[in-house]
C-alpha cells in the first residue's frame, strides 16, 4: 500500500502562496520589459530589489510554517534534525549575495 506524503505546513496557505508567486512572476516580467525598453538602471535595480523583498517574504513565511508545523507539531524525535535542516536552508537563503 503506498504511503501518503506528509502534510506540509503550508498546505492551508497554498492558494495564497500561488497568488504571491504569480504576482512576483509579473514583477519579473516587468523587469524584463524595463530592460527591453532600455529603462534607467537605478529604476531597474529598484524593481529587482522589490522582487527580492517579495521572494524573501515568501521564504520567511515558509520557514515560519515549517517551524510551527513540521518542528513544533511534528514528532518529538525529529525536532533536532528538522531544526538543523531548517537552519541550513535559512543559511543558504541569507548567503545569496
Image (spheres, grey):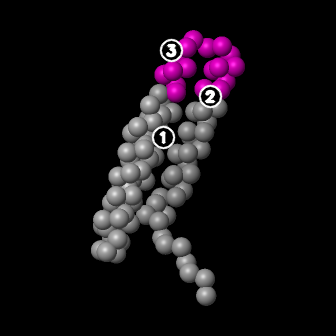
Q: Quadrant of residue 66?
A: bottom left
Crowding at label 2, few (<14), some or many (≥20) Cα neighbours within 10 Å? some
Q: Quadrant of residue 35?
A: top right
Q: Please state which of the two labelled residues, at mark 2 or mark 1, is closer to the viewer.
A: 1
33 over 96 or under it: above or below: above
Q: Is residue 43 magenta?
A: yes
Q: Report if residue 65 is visible in the image.
A: no
Q: Secondary structure at mark 2?
A: helix
Outermost right residue: 36
Q: Main secondary structure of the magenta part?
A: helix
Give the labeled residue for mark 1: 55
Q: Earlier in the sequence, mark 3 or mark 2?
A: 2
Tell me what residue is drawn at x 54 percent, y 56 percent. Answer: 15
Give the labeled residue for mark 3: 42
Q: Are marks 2 and 1 in contact (CB under 8 Å)?
A: no
Q: Report if residue 8 is visible in the image.
A: yes
36 sits to left or right of 54:
right
Q: Please state which of the two labelled residues, at mark 3 or mark 2, is closer to the viewer.
A: 3
Tell me what residue is drawn at x 55 percent, y 39 percent. Answer: 24
34 sits to left or right of 42:
right
Tell me what residue is drawn at x 58 percent, y 33 percent. Answer: 27
Crowding at label 1, few (<14), some or many (≥20) Cα neighbours within 10 Å? some
Span shown in magenta: 30-48
Q: Earlier in the sequence, mark 1 or mark 3?
A: 3
Q: Quadrant of residue 92?
A: top left
Give the labeled residue for mark 2: 30
65 sits to left or right of 43:
left
Expressed as whole percent of the image width and height from the top left, the position of residue 29 reads: 64, 32
Q: Secondary structure at mark 3?
A: helix
Expressed as whole percent of the image width and height from the top left, the position of residue 3 reads: 56, 81
Q: In the picture, which quadrant includes the N terminus?
A: bottom right
Amino acid at each position: 500500500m503506498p504511503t501518503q506524503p506528509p502534510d506540509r505546513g503550508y498546505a492551508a496557505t497554498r492558494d495564497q502562496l500561488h497568488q504571491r508567486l504569480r504576482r512576483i512572476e509579473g514583477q519579473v516580467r516587468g523587469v524584463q520589459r524595463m530592460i527591453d525598453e532600455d529603462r534607467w538602471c537605478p529604476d531597474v535595480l529598484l524593481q529587482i530589489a522589490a522582487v527580492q523583498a517579495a521572494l524573501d517574504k515568501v521564504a520567511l513565511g515558509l520557514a515560519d510554517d515549517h517551524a510551527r508545523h513540521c518542528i513544533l507539531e511534528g514528532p518529538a524525535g525529529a525536532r533536532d534534525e528538522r531544526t538543523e535542516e531548517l537552519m541550513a536552508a535559512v543559511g543558504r537563503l541569507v548567503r545569496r549575495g
